[in-house]
Image (cartoon, rainbow, N blue to C red):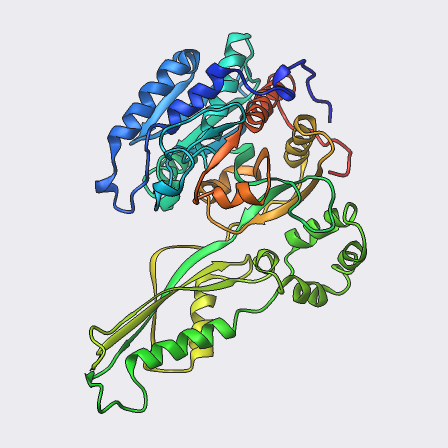
Amino acid sequence: MNLPTRSDATMTQPVDDPTAERLAAALRCATVSADDPHRLDTTAFDRLDAHLRQSFPLVHAELELRRFGPSRLYRWPGTEPTGVAAILLAHQDVVPVDDPQRWTHPPFAGVVDDEYIWGRGAIDDKSRVLAALEAVESALADGLRPRRTIYLAFGHDEEVFGGDGAVPMAEHLRQAGVYADLLLDEGGVITADVIEGVRQPVATIMLGEKGYATVRLSVTDTGGHSSMPGTQTAIGRIARAVHRIQTHPMPLRLTPVIADMLHRLRTVMHGPRGHLLGLARIAPSLITRVMATQPQTAALVRTTTAPTVIRGGVRANVLPAQAEALVNFRILPGDSVAAVLRHCRKVVRDPQVRFDVVGTATEPSTVTAPGPAFDLVADLARAVVPGIAVTTGLVPGATDSRHYADLALTRCNFAPVVLDERDLASIHGTDERLSRVNYARLITFNRRLIEYFATTGTPQTSGADS
């Protein structure tokens, strides 16, 4: 694939201070999402709105902005009336901070030092919001325009399933008949020293995501005094049910996207593991059993089971009349929410245990095949971070892109930032930070993507084995 060439110091040098400071200022806006939309602190989003309008005047002068509450949908009309090139997603909201005292810098202080930009949202996901706007602002200043329309959709409630942000924005695009070549969102990154047996950094461009469901197990009993218990108490029945579900997980399965991921990794994995991956297409059951031995890889080959909450009882000498447990499932494509419920009932085998899906549940997304848009993202990633290996994958969590899945030919969940295990642990954890070099990569990647759509318009097959 022929990419636009451009000499750009941000490829190898940290971003300049004004660029880093603009991200840091956004991190100072504590845009924490809320399960109850009526309890959302909109003042933080208002401060972020003012900051974005001041920082990116050309974007707000020349792009069409439609608001869905605090969510932002920008339309950048193309110079040719020939459809939509891309929908670029990111989200403004962040998760709460449990223990700010453990942070090196206060989580909403937006500290910039010589190496990092610190704060909640630095990786997940304000850096992608700001990087996209930086790229569009600089492109507008240089007189660049996309040949085909580009949308930027920045939700405000991704961390609580996007019901008031991504859902209405996606529906608006659906009603407008939008269908893009590329849908690009968060999910995959470039990992360093994370995959054993692979010496070079690996860029994982996700092509779909798992579903999500929380199942409540509940039992009602007569209760009574603990001195005269029956053969089975409400708590004992719930404990047995949770144990049965955890020790009888859903079946292992090698999906096509994970088979493709392993095939691509095989070419860069050294030693016996590389030979083992070569068996994926002829002995998938062997591969899935090996992958099931580690939590990180087990999540790729089965619907995972995670008991997270158990409740029951009020005093040590009182038999509780009620007990319940919550079990969270991340659902592999090919399974479903209904299949999870059937599995729970089958393995527990207790008619006195009730099973209900609580909260928001989502089915696994469709998984798009690698194509020209995937090749474009892969080639841009290689340009920004030379020497990487590229593979496909599946997002184990949930992103806003599931709401837009039918609006694009190819879906890619990816950002060209190089993260190690410590960086990954900081996402939703302590000391979230993004290196200034990584932020430069994000801006450069977005700028080159815009340059591509300004000169070419439609992704073309590169002919390379991406």
In the rendered image, residue 115, in percent from the top left (x then y), is placed at 54, 26
Q: Quadrant of residue 449?
A: top right
Q: Is residue 174 left or right of residue 371?
A: left
Residue 440 in sight:
yes
Residue visible at 54% across and 32% down? 180
In the rendered image, residue 20, in percent from the top left (x then y), is placed at 48, 21
In the rendered image, residue 425, in percent from the top left (x then y), is placed at 51, 46
Residue visible at 66% across and 26% down? 384
Quadrant location of the C terminus in the rendered image: top right
In the rendered image, residue 227, in percent from the top left (x then y), is placed at 22, 90
Q: Is residue 48 left or right of residue 90?
A: left
Task: Please determine whether, in this image, residue 455 is positioned above or below residue 37.
Answer: above
Q: Nearer the viewer, residue 312 or 74?
A: 312
Quadrant location of the N terminus in the rendered image: top right
Task: Please determine whether, in this image, residue 422 is positioned above or below residue 130.
Answer: below
Q: Is residue 11 left or right of residue 131?
A: right
Q: Nearer the viewer, residue 86 or 280?
A: 280
